[in-house]
Image (cartoon, rainbow, N blue to C red):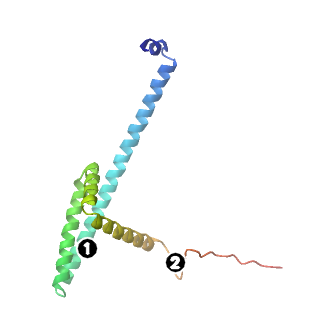
Amino acid sequence: MANIIEAGGEGGPAAKAREGAEQIKEKALQSVEEVREKASAGKDKLSERVGRLSSALKSAGENLRQEDELFSRYADQASQRLERAAQYVRTADPKQALRDVESFARREPAIFFGGAFLLGLAAARFLKSSQHMRPGQRWAEPFDVEVPEVRRG
């Protein structure tokens, strides 16, 4: 079999196959690197957002301190947990983070799915609020269709 490959020579099918395999390997490595860069950027953005949310909750807790000590304590606890989550996201290896999420989902499925549901609601609310609307414009209903006026005559 080695003789057949060697018999292909410099421009033979075996050389072309090796060259094609090298090109595929290079493209795959480039793709993996691009995905790593995007994941790292996404991880940094997520960490920053969670950190900002933590700061907002901490500020809310401080504002509530005079009015309601119990809610102030809850806001402080939530702020601390979010700050730890932001630190984890900032420093965690993506593969390890995925394993940790899977492990948590197996241990606490109700909490995991409840959190996923709440996260989905928050994301939908955020997306809905971030859409630009003109003054006087209302949200479209699922079956709203604008029908153009037809002029006769």
**Few, some or many residues within 10 Å of mark 1 (<14, 14–19, 20+):** some
Residue nearest the viewer, comparing 136 with 146: 146
Q: Position of residue 8 (x, y in %)?
A: 49, 15
Residue located at (32% from left, 59% from top):
45
Q: Position of residue 9 (x, y in %)?
A: 48, 14
Decide if residue 122 is on the left or right side of residue 150.
left
The residue under label 1 is 56
Q: Position of residue 138 (x, y in %)?
A: 53, 80
Q: Position of residue 104 (x, y in %)?
A: 25, 59
Residue located at (45% from left, 31% from top):
23
* Quarter holding residue 88: bottom left
Decide if residue 115 is on the left or right side of residue 134.
left
Residue located at (48% from left, 73% from top):
132
Callout 1 touching callout 2 (CB < 8 Å): no
Using the numbered discs, state the Cα–Cα distance from disc 1 to disc 2 in whole angstroms. Answer: 29 Å
Decide if residue 45 is on the left or right side of residue 85.
right
Q: Amino acid at mark 2?
A: Trp
On the rendered image, what quadrant is the N terminus found in? top left
Residue nearest the viewer, comparing 67 with 78: 78
Q: Amino acid at mark 1?
A: Ala
Under circle 2, the secondary element is loop
Under circle 1, the secondary element is helix
Going from N to C along the chain, the mark reached first, 1 or 2, is 1
Decide if residue 17 is on the left or right side of residue 68.
right
**Few, some or many residues within 10 Å of mark 2 (<14, 14–19, 20+):** few
Q: Which mark identifies residue 139?
A: 2
* Quarter holding residue 32: top left
